[in-house]
Image (cartoon, helix red, strand yellow):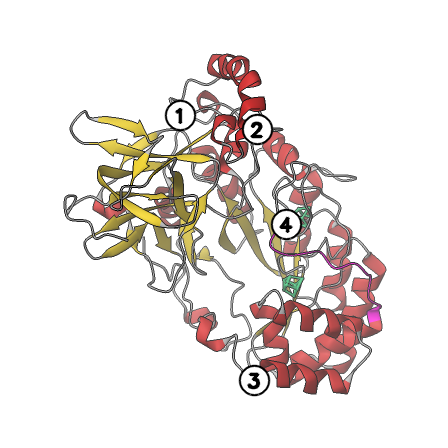
């Protein structure tokens, strides 16, 4: 990638060729998308991207940059590289590294007419004019519009974050929200992992949970699965092949619009004996031990109540050491209560909003509703659990003042102790169309402003992106916000 020479103060626009090569535009600046508007970037909006972190091309999009001469945002439909090769460029983004939160979306045009396949483009163009007119009637945000979802390919489920080029290297619209000492890549993916997996499997060779974990550690490079074999810190215990919801952006289930997902959901229901053995061994052997159900890409662990409750009971019959943590969508408050009675002491509820309608639109709950989720917070409080939210953030929606108010209510009621900021992974072109229009969003604070306002109102409310190190004796001394805004 060429170095930025002209835009010393503001980052330059990056574009991708269909073969994946990334180029810096000679004149246009990087632009930001705050979820409702395009913005000109300032140096304080971006930080350096770690050297070893990859950029991503966004097939089927067009990059948008800012033209300092005309003072306008420009959508790029053609780009000629230094070798004289002209192509239709794609927007470039990055997925945030662990511990980092996306502050701005990549600025890009998402329409059917940008489909990489010419035949699909032709089909889509037949529908796009009408779709544009309809969308323009209900969209006064000034952002590019979405075309026909059936024709445009869904982007894989990542959190597409704005990136740009400076003389010092690539920058991204991110901020750090946690300390990352236990999640550094050099602690994982080591040559001895296979040996450790084989040794652990030899102790319990038919245990389906361990067999699944070995696949998760080897094939999906899952850190929490690896920790089970390294016998340290937080381990995952996948148990749920099904879910009570059908989220638009479910990482473990392919959604209706045919978007590829990074992980496949497990296909079996392990027994409570198998689950209990894996939990107990990890809690007995590990430093700072925590065992987490529902860690990321399985179904809903409370869906089969009797199994999870019995598994916790069996583990606790062997050891009282460490933390048993339930990551859940909050759909089964009474199962959470029984798990707490059995010995689980931490609860993390995944949620993308405290707006009932948008929650329902995104989660598509099967046999529960938003009220059950809220009840789960209060059950957690009654049972004395440490309660976090896994807040799936979306710039332009999460940062509403109304969301701050709703979260504040839970904090004031003693039903929320920590906000874990997670980047909602969705095709931005698709999701922006699904959200209510700008006029229904009230005051938007920006993602940094959202954190700052919650922190100001609740100095003891903890922030992070990972589950808290509750089993560490020094944990209470850690600052409430250990990141950098
Ligand atoms: S709650 Fe979790 S597992 Fe269930 S559909 Fe949503 S993202 Fe997927
Ligand atoms: S988080 Fe996903 S990859 Fe990791 S152990 Fe659980 S199911 Fe496996």
Q: Residue at x 49, y 26 (%)?
A: 113
Which of pointers 2 and 3 indicates the residue nearer the eye?
2
- CA distance for labels 1 and 4: 36 Å
- CA distance for labels 2 and 1: 26 Å
Please name the residue that numbered disc 2 is placed on: 119
Which element carries disc 1, helix, strand or loop?
Answer: loop
> In the rendering, which numbered label is found on residue 143?
1
Q: Residue at x 38, y 62 (%)?
A: 482
Choose the circle earlier in sequence order: 1 or 4.
1
Label the magenta part by its dominant secondary structure: loop
Which quarter of the picture shows residue 123? top right
Please name the residue that numbered disc 4 is placed on: 377
- CA distance for labels 4 and 3: 41 Å
Check mark 4 vs ligand 1: CB closer than 8 Å? yes or no: no
Q: Was residue 357 drawn as part of the magenta stretch in this picture?
A: no
- In magenta, the rendered stretch is 261-272
Residue placed most toward the observer, 184 or 383 = 184
The vertical placement of 213 against 354, above or below, is below
Please name the residue that numbered disc 3 is placed on: 192
Choose the circle earlier in sequence order: 2 or 1.
2
Choose the circle earlier in sequence order: 3 or 1.
1
- CA distance for labels 3 and 1: 49 Å
Which element carries disc 3, helix, strand or loop?
Answer: loop
Which of pointers 4 and 2 indicates the residue nearer the eye?
2
Q: Residue at x 82, y 66 (%)?
A: 270
Residue placed most toward the observer, 126 or 451 = 126
Left of 355 or right of it: where is 441? left
């Amino acid at each position: 990638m060429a170095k930025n020479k002209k835009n010393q103060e503001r980052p330059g626009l990056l574009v991708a060729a269909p073969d994946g090569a990334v180029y810096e535009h000679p004149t246009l600046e990087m632009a930001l998308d705050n979820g409702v508007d395009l913005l000109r970037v300032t140096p304080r909006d971006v930080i350096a991207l770690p050297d070893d972190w990859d950029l991503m091309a966004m097939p089927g999009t067009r990059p948008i940059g800012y033209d300092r001469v005309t003072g306008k945002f420009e959508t790029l439909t053609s780009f000629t590289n230094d070798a004289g090769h002209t192509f239709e460029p794609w927007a470039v983004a990055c997925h945030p590294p662990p511990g980092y939160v996306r502050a701005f979306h990549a600025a890009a045009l998402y329409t059917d007419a940008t489909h990489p396949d010419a035949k699909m483009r032709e089909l889509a163009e037949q529908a796009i004019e009408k779709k544009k007119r309809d969308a323009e009637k209900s969209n006064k945000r000034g952002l590019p519009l979405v075309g026909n979802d059936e024709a445009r390919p869904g982007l894989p489920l990542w959190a597409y974050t704005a990136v740009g080029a400076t003389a010092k290297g690539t920058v991204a619209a991110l901020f750090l929200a946690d300390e990352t000492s236990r999640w550094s890549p050099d602690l994982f993916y080591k040559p001895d992992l296979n040996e450790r997996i084989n040794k652990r499997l030899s102790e319990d060779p038919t245990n389906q949970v361990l067999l699944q974990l070995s696949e998760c550690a080897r094939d999906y490079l899952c850190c929490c699965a690896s920790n089970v074999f390294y016998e340290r810190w937080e381990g995952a215990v996948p148990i749920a092949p099904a879910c009570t919801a059908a989220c638009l952006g479910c990482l473990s289930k392919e959604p209706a619009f045919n978007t590829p997902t990074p992980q496949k959901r497990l296909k079996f229901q392990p027994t409570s004996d198998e689950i209990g053995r894996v939990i107990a061994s990890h809690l007995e052997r590990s430093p700072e031990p925590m065992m987490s159900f529902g860690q990321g890409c399985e179904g809903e662990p409370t869906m089969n109540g009797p199994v999870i409750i019995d598994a916790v009971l069996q583990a606790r019959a062997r050891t009282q050491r460490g933390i048993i943590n339930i990551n859940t969508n909050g759909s089964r408050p009474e199962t959470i209560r029984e798990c707490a009675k059995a010995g689980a002491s931490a609860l993390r509820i995944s949620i993308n909003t405290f707006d009932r309608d948008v929650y329902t639109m995104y989660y598509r709950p099967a046999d529960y509703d938003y009220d059950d989720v809220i009840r789960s917070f209060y059950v957690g409080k009654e049972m004395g659990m440490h309660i976090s939210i896994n807040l799936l953030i979306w710039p332009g929606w999460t940062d509403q003042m109304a969301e701050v108010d709703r979260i504040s209510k839970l904090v004031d009621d003693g039903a929320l102790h920590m906000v874990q900021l997670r980047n909602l992974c969705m095709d931005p072109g698709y999701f922006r169309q699904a959200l209510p229009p700008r006029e229904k969003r009230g005051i938007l604070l920006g993602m940094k402003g959202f954190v700052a306002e919650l922190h100001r109102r609740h100095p003891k409310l903890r922030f992070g992106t990972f589950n808290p190190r509750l089993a560490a004796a020094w944990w209470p001394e850690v600052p409430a916000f250990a990141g950098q805004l």
